[in-house]
């Protein structure tokens, strides 16, 4: 059999074989088979599946105000973030273009989640309006159908009404009023999807950090006076604070020194007591003056320790 190298085929007219049939006759050519495709010229910044916008530098600015919340630009408030504004601000999707993820994925996940929340809210509002419109029209249509049926039954009363005229055994007309049901369902949906527009509060706003203290000129003057008084008293308060801290540190250091002195004196007294005990067991030849001196030293140490303990 005539086999082909790996990856190649016998191309015979409209057919291709990796191995020619034993009974085949005709002419063929050996070659590769590839799907029909074309190459895009690769330029700087143009890659398949990279940014949604080819060039971020040449993008047109949006007409909507997208400044930082809490700042007023040209006298117009820019601190209310409605769903429409959120969508306009986070609309362009930025994709990872280096291929590290293996698939297209937004870089700013949190921004996309915020935008998705706004999209769901607006979509829910549109669905709510559409369902309520359909329910209202259905209620009107239900009323019109009942009126027409009543008129037909009145005109055909001598013949038994519509049922008698057409000899129908099951001609009872019943159209359920679903308008209230739809209204209740859409009201629940409205509560679930509603997100209060977020407002950025500056430090000078009523809900800001200062709580609207500068609401009018009187409060502004009062706050200015308080600040000035505080600045004037600051040079007097600093030495006082410094003195308090210094005294506290000296007191702590003195207490530590006293404890150490008491421990040393107690250790000396214990050593003298131990020497006296040893002297009683094994008397040493000492003069009367030396004995009196040792007794006096011991008494002085005891007095100092008792005094420190009393203090």
Image (cartoon, rainbow, N blue to C red):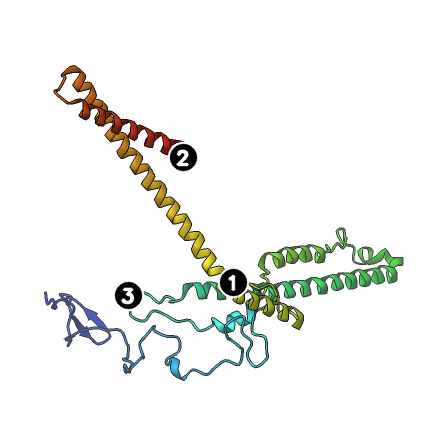
Question: In the displayed structure, does residue 148 sit left or right of residue 243?
Answer: right
Q: Residue furthest top?
A: 281
From the image, tell me which residue sits under label 3. 100
From the image, tell me which residue sits under label 2. 311
* Between 95 and 139, the one nearer to me in the picture: 95
Bin the neighbour count of mark 1 within 10 Å (Cα to Cα): few under 14, some 14-19, many 20 and up: some
Does 220 sit above or below residue 173? below
Bin the neighbour count of mark 2 within 10 Å (Cα to Cα): few under 14, some 14-19, many 20 and up: few
From the image, tell me which residue sits under label 1. 117
Give the residue at x 29% y 38%.
Answer: 260
Task: Pinpoint residue 141: horizontal percent, then vertical percent.
Answer: 74, 64
Give the residue at x 28% y 30%.
Answer: 266
Give the residue at x 39% y 45%.
Answer: 251
Does 284 sit above or below residue 189? above
- Quarter residue 292 falls in: top left
Task: Pinpoint residue 78: horizontal percent, then vertical percent.
Answer: 56, 74
Q: Is residue 201 visible?
A: no
Does dot 1 land on a helix, a strand or a loop? helix
Task: Pinpoint residue 216: horizontal percent, then vertical percent.
Answer: 66, 71
Question: In the displayed structure, does residue 311 sit left or right of residue 88?
Answer: left
Q: How far apart, in angstroms, are the residues tagged by discs 3 and 2?
A: 76 Å
The answer to whether the residues at label 3 and label 1 have Cβ atoms under 8 Å apart is no
Bin the neighbour count of mark 3 within 10 Å (Cα to Cα): few under 14, some 14-19, many 20 and up: few
Give the residue at x 75% y 51%.
Answer: 170
**Mark in the foreground, 1 or 2:** 2
**Sequence order check, earlier mark of 1 and 2:** 1
Q: How far apart, in angstroms, are the residues tagged by discs 1 and 2?
A: 72 Å
Question: In the displayed structure, does residue 288 sit left or right of residue 38?
Answer: left
The answer to whether the residues at label 1 and label 2 have Cβ atoms under 8 Å apart is no
């Amino acid at each position: 059999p005539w086999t082909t190298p790996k990856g190649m085929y016998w191309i015979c007219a409209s057919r291709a074989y990796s191995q020619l049939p034993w009974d085949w006759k005709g002419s063929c050519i050996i070659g590769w088979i590839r799907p029909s495709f074309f190459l895009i010229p690769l330029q700087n910044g143009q890659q398949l599946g990279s940014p949604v916008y080819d060039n971020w530098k040449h993008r047109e600015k949006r007409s909507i105000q997208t400044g930082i919340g809490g700042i007023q630009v040209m006298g117009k408030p820019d601190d209310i973030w409605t769903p429409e504004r959120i969508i306009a601000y986070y609309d362009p999707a930025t994709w990872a273009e280096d291929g590290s993820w293996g698939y297209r994925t937004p870089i700013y996940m949190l921004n996309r989640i915020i935008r998705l929340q706004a999209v769901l809210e607006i979509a829910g509002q549109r669905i709510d309006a559409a369902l309520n419109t359909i329910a209202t029209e259905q209620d009107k249509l239900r009323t019109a159908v009942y009126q027409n049926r009543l008129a037909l039954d009145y005109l055909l009363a001598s013949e038994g009404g519509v049922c008698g005229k057409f000899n129908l055994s099951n001609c009872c007309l019943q159209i359920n009023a679903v308008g209230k049901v739809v209204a209740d369902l859409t009201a629940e949906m409205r509560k679930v999807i509603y997100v209060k527009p977020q407002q950025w509060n500056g430090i000078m706003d009523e809900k800001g950090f200062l709580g609207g203290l500068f609401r009018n000129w009187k409060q502004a003057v009062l706050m200015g006076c308080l600040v000035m008084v505080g600045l004037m008293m600051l040079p007097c308060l600093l030495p006082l604070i410094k003195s308090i801290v210094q005294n506290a540190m000296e007191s702590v250091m003195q207490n530590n020194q006293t404890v150490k002195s008491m421990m040393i004196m107690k250790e000396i007294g214990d050593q003298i007591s131990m020497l006296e005990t040893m002297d009683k067991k094994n008397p040493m030849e000492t003069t009367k003056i030396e004995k009196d001196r040792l007794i006096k030293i011991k008494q002085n140490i005891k007095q100092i320790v008792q005094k420190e303990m009393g203090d």
